[in-house]
Amino acid sequence: MKSLARLIVSAIVLSTSTSFAAGGNAPAFHVNIDMDNRASLQRGATLFVNRCLSCHSAEFSRYNRVADDLGIPQAVMEENMIFTGRKFGQTMTVAMTTENATEWFGAPPPDLSVKARARGADWIYSFLKGYYVSEDSPRGVDNLMLPGTAMPHVLWDLQGYQALKAVDHQDEHADSGHAAAPASPFELVQEGKMAAVQYDRAMTDLVNYLVYMAEPAQLKRKSVGVGVLFFLAAFGVIAYFLKKEFWKDIH
Ligand code: HEC
């Protein structure tokens, strides 16, 4: 009953989320979401449980539903993806309490179940790519999307550290004849374990997963839709030949 009430409240918050999601900059990067890419969703799920679920919960998400939707065998999930002492059929919650988290980080890590819908995929992708070294920040890093954020640069080992590029206006003029993609505002100052393209791909997988998690039904809905189209196409052919058969004697 309590969770039903929570669900209703979050639905109301979601429906007005554009006004609630304030407090951040416009996305700096665009990400291509692909719900048909199961391998990407599986990699995203792995990253999520390994690197995000330690602080953030996903209270509306159940391990067994995720395993079922993404085609991950139960044993694989139980052995490699559940670290929180939870059971296969349970929701993805974390042991940390909100009070502890607020004390440690200065702000509570929000539940990420439906975050992708509230913020949008591009925003989260840009946020995960948006950390840069900053001497003005007490943590030594800041984030372009959410200045002064309480979330540490938790993926620094993968991405490395980047700095904000000084804007060079002469370069802009030199390039003005080309329709090149907008340049990144960052430059790498310390390499991580992943090359820039690899990190982008990993973040695409992760955001892909967060988008799926925000609305798991979209996977099923799509396959039902495809089935309906096949049925209509097949039925159309049958109807055509039936019609021919019926009218044969009349003409
Ligand atoms: C060490 C704890 C910690 C880890 C690990 C962590 N986060 Fe966070 N995260 C936070 C905190 C704290 C905030 C609140 C930041 C704020 O309000 O300034 C936050 C905020 C966020 C937000 C912004 C929410 C909003 O709309 O304001 C997103 C998105 C997010 N985290 C995604 C992730 C993802 C994806 C991962 C996994 C790669 C992750 N986080 C790992 C602590 C963490």
Image: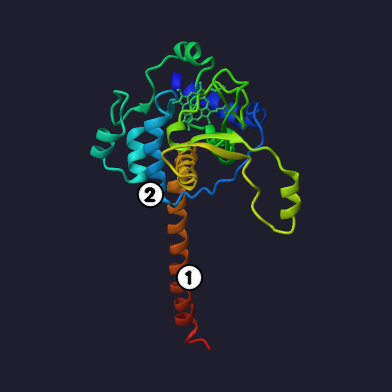
| Mark drawn on residue 217 | none
> Where's residue 76, x and y in %?
26, 39
Under circle 2, the secondary element is: helix
> Can residue 161 be seen at all in this image of the molecule?
yes
As measured in the structure, the alpha-carbon distance from the residue carrying label 2 to the one carrying label 1 is: 35 Å
**Nearest the eye: 106 or 156:** 156
Q: Is residue 61 visible?
A: no
Percent of width and height locating residue 224: 43, 53
- The residue lying at 37 percent from left, 18 percent from top is 95
Q: Which residue is mark 2?
A: 39
Query: Left of 237 or right of it: where is 183?
Result: right
Q: Which residue is pictured at 43% across the width and 73% down the height?
A: 238
Count how many numbered circles sit on residues in the image. 2
- Left or right relative to 4: residue 81: left
Of tags 2 and 1, the one toward the viewer is: 2
- Residue position for label 1: 236
Residue type at mark 2? Ala
Cβ atoms under marks 2 and 1 closer than 8 Å: no
Q: 38 above or below 154? A: below
Q: Is residue 68 left or right of residue 157?
A: left
